[in-house]
Image (spheres, grey):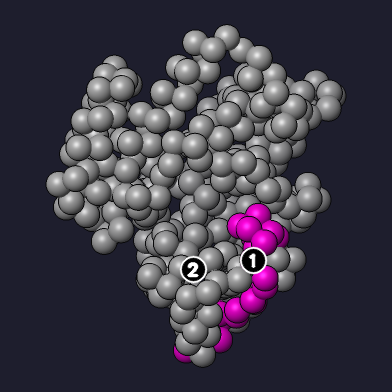
Amino acid sequence: MQPIVTVILAAFNGADYLAEAIDSVRRQTLRDWRLIVVDDGSVDATPEIAAACAAQDDRISVIRQANAGVAAARNTGLRAATTRWVALLDHDDMYLPTKLEKQMRFLNDHPEIGCFGTWGRRIGSRGRILGTFDVGPTSPEHFARMRADDRLIYMLASSVVFDRDIALALGGFRAEPGGTEDVALWNRIADTHAIQTLPERLVLYRVHGASVSATHLNAQRLNSERLALNNRHRRAGRREVGYEEFLAAWERQPEASKRKARRISRTLALYRQGGGMLADRSPLGLWYVLRSAWLSPMLIADRVIRQLGLHRRA
């Protein structure tokens, strides 16, 4: 059976969760897939786990490379893939069983789409449901509005199926500050092709209680601003702004503005850390959430209210 979609799983020191991630692909109701595990220079048991899974299923192959970062690892998988459609999966996330089947059925009827994601659920390190991850345009009209406003399009990376040839023509994934490589590619695809999200939660996105730093989050937020600016520049025929150039301009802002931005990043980092800990039933998580609320009460109140509302609708 020839595969119709290739899943690229870039892994670095992912031994704790890799087997679960791979098993979630093997449990898909869609059977004609190929999985490429790209081991990005892991020093734990990741290579052995990947090799054992490949030995059990000939649809799985493993590529090992020296550590070069997630963008380079995904590009390795892109070059090795042979199908038009390519999906991503991070080593600590999981697909729900009908994920690929529903996406490929939709793409068969909508070949004009270049990139197609789904909603997801956030889980803690032990798998307990933490919240939701509902991002991306859910209709052609929604996408058209976002595209007309040059707004930044976010999608959950492990939910996305995209056109390999389009991605390669754009140079694939670029290394970006704050882990925004995927966001950068989706928005470059949106220059010329439709993007849409299926409003069903078909992916489990793992949040680690100790994995979010304020410094990382601040770089992520700053680079997201730069990516939105570059949407406008590209579509107006102007050159893109590099991160160092953008950062130099940001540093010239009034000190009060920079302090506010850093406080928001610190708040969100503490909130995410606390949420991950609470999902793992660690009482220390409450301390992190309270600290985040003390820094930015209105911001955290809005987050909590939104999450409660989403849980009720779910």
Residue found 69% across the figure and 19% down from its top: 249
Q: CA distance from mark 1 to mark 2?
A: 10 Å
Res. 231 mark: none
Query: Does 259 sit left or right of 125 as displayed?
Result: right
Residue 95 seen in this snapshot: no
Kind of residue at disc 1 = Asn
Magenta span has 71?
Answer: yes
Query: Does 18 sit left or right of 223 as displayed?
Result: left
Q: Which residue is mark 2?
A: 13
Residue 189 seen in this snapshot: yes
Instruction: Relative to 164, say whether 36 is above or below.
Output: below
Residue found 77% across the figure and 54% down from its top: 168
The one of 6 and 75 positioned closer to us in this rendering? 75
Residue found 65% across the figure and 43% down from its top: 176
Numbered-mark total? 2
**Image quarter for residue 232?**
top right
Q: Which residue is mark 1?
A: 67
Kind of residue at disc 2 = Asn
**Image quarter for residue 26?**
bottom left
What segment is highlighted magenta in the picture?
56-75
Q: Residues within 10 Å of mark 2 (few under 14, many from 20)?
A: some
Q: Are marks 1 and 2 in contact (CB under 8 Å)?
A: no
Residue found 67% across the figure and 70% down from its top: 66
x, y (%) of residue 161?
57, 54
Q: Which quadrant: the C terminus?
A: top left
Q: Residues within 10 Å of mark 1 (few under 14, many from 20)?
A: some
Q: Which quadrant: the N terminus?
A: bottom right
Q: Secondary structure at mark 1?
A: loop
Query: Does 112 sit left or right of 272 as displayed?
Result: right
Instruction: Relative to 67, say whether 159 is above or below.
Output: above
x, y (%) of residue 36?
60, 72
x, y (%) of residue 276?
29, 48
